[in-house]
Amino acid sequence: MRSRIHCFWLFVAGAIAVANAHPHGSTDKTERAASDSKLVVAHHIVGYTYPYDITDWESDIQLAYNSGLDGFALNVGSNSWESTQVANAYQAAANLGLDFKLFLSLDMTSFPCTTANDASALCANVSAHASHPNQLLWNGNVFVSTFSGSDCTFGQNSAAAGWQSEFIDQLTGSNAVHFVPSFFVDPSTFTTFNDIMDGDFNWNGGWPTDLTYSSAQSELGSNAGDLDDATFPSSAESVLSGNVGAFTSDSQYINGLNSVSGSDKTYIAAVTPWFFVHYSPQTYDKNWIYLADYWSYVVRWETLIANRDQVDVVEVVTWNDYSESHYIGPIEGSQPNSQAWTNGMPHLGWLAMTNYYATAFRNGSYQSITEDQIYMWARPHPKNANASDDSVGKPTSYQLTEDKLWAVVFATSNATVAITTASGTTQTSNVSAGVTKLSMDLVPGSGMSATLTRNGQTVVSLDPGTNFTFNANPETYNYNAFVCYATSG
Ligand SMILES: *[C@@H]1O[C@H](CO)[C@@H](O)[C@H](O)[C@H]1NC(C)=O
Ligand SMILES: *[C@@H]1O[C@H](CO)[C@@H](O)[C@H](O)[C@H]1NC(C)=O
Ligand SMILES: *[C@@H]1O[C@H](CO)[C@@H](O)[C@H](O)[C@H]1NC(C)=O
Ligand SMILES: *[C@@H]1O[C@H](CO)[C@@H](O)[C@H](O)[C@H]1NC(C)=O
Ligand SMILES: CC(=O)N[C@H]1CO[C@H](CO)[C@@H](O)[C@@H]1O
């Protein structure tokens, strides 16, 4: 697990102008029944919204709605200003008049939780918005999640007793909660929380968190040395890619929930596009990657759609966590001193492809592609490059990644896709209607671009120009991804 960084350094505030709405055809979902509806929400960290006003919340909510999301899990911590931002979020949703759901994700790495008064404060936070029209209800109860909290006793002799008597039992009537925490415990011990957990959110489920450089070396055995190269032979790729998007930890969590008594067993699965964090020992002391190559975001969505019978809610991790490089929203608000690896690294392409997968998750079948699109992403420097001015060093497990770009093509019908790295280095593929995943070796000192052609005509042209160069001589380490995309429209 990780600990949340709660700090607000100074920032760039950027209200993003959002063009015309494309409502995704939802009907009235005011009262969700767990059995008949599926939701896709994004984890929105209120701690990074210090400079927001209501219009910033409106633009986030409108953009999320247009991108096929049903709501935000509002991660809220103990900074006193955060309750004002939570109120702004609810107000913004009401102003827009959208069927967009909000619920609190209480960040228990931030809130104190040793006394009954600590629980009373959380109850007041929940009650403050319980009757708001945009509050997510589940079987009529107020949906509440957490980040962590399995050790919170609130003055009782165990965490189970604390959550039960000081939180759940205190919230009654229209404030009664549907409690779906993200507890970082072995799911085989979920029965500790019988009658308390109405479900669980598997925060780490979207990454292969057990895969490290050393575990991958063991998996590769005599071929372990392949990991030190810029790109891998297909034998090594198949071992590594087998870890990406898997349902293994989801199954463990679902089994754990199935043993919990007095529980609705609401399962929230995580989908996440990336992970890179880079703080020195003198600051937050976090410097590692999780493997997210091999089109991880897309593959994970495909896994969740294939297993949708077992998943109630998909939570995108995250909308705006710049510190760990897994934001899919715009770069705005405040940053926890993550500018060095965030600025200039847009991720909105991942948001743009989300509607297609979110719709398939809710619906059970993939809709046909109605607009040609190319998505492409890559890290900005070779994995083995030595940064000239970065005392933090390379992140743990950087060896797992490859010096490749990852492309995903959405084609309305058969087409030809040409991807170019260095000038004169072009890879051409014939693709069928639907989604095709492509990759290509990057060339140090060069960029990346792509076209989709059909019947000799260029239909989509993607070229980030000087915004992306695979820089052989970086000053600082950056294993975040630069994501670009283009459509025919
Ligand atoms: C899923 O999509 C199909 C095809 O567009 C449509 O007929 C059906 O009503 C949708 N089902 C749901 C549950 O939205
Ligand atoms: C794509 O299809 C065309 C027409 O069938 C063919 O001539 C060409 O060789 C194919 N290209 C590739 C890279 O397969
Ligand atoms: C293109 O379309 C035909 C059928 O119309 C199909 O048989 C073929 O496999 C498709 N894909 C490619 C890459 O040529
Ligand atoms: C480069 O990035 C800037 C700032 O995000 C953007 O406005 C511009 O359109 C980008 N240029 C290209 C060619 O994508
Ligand atoms: C409405 C409400 O009770 N808000 C509280 C939520 O928690 C924060 C942090 O403890 C308090 O400052 C708010 O007053």
Image (cartoon, rainbow, N blue to C red):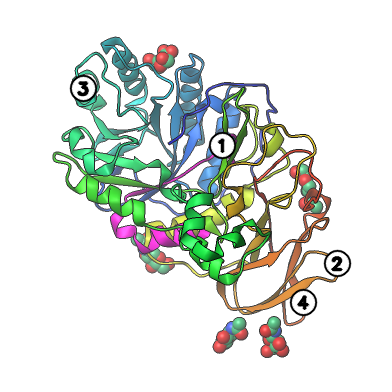
Residue 326 shown in magenta: yes
Q: Distance of mark 2 from mark 4, alpha carbons?
A: 21 Å
Residue toward you, 384 or 185:
384
Is disc 2 surrounded by few (<14), some (14 to 19) or many (20+) residues within 10 Å? few
The residue under label 3 is 158
The residue under label 4 is 457
Answer yes or no: disc 4 within 8 Å of ligand 2.
no
Q: Distance of mark 4 from mark 1, alpha carbons?
A: 38 Å
Amino acid type at circle 2 is Ser
Q: Nearer the viewer, mark 2 or mark 3?
A: 3
Q: Seen in the image, is 327 located left or right of residue 38? A: right
Answer yes or no: disc 2 within 8 Å of ligand 4.
no
Residue 36 locus on image (x, y percent): 27, 53
Q: Nearer the viewer, mark 4 or mark 3?
A: 3
Answer yes or no: disc 1 within 8 Å of ligand 4.
no
Seen at 69% across and 42% down, the residue is 478
Q: Is residue 21 above or below residue 235?
A: above
Q: Seen in the image, is 280 located left or right of residue 249? A: right
Q: Are marks 3 and 1 in contact (CB under 8 Å)?
A: no
Question: N-terminal of the two: label 1 or label 2?
Answer: 1
Seen at 72% across and 76% down, the residue is 428
- The secondary structure type at the circle numbered 4 is strand
Question: N-terminal of the two: label 2 or label 4?
Answer: 2
Q: Which mark is residue 423?
A: 2
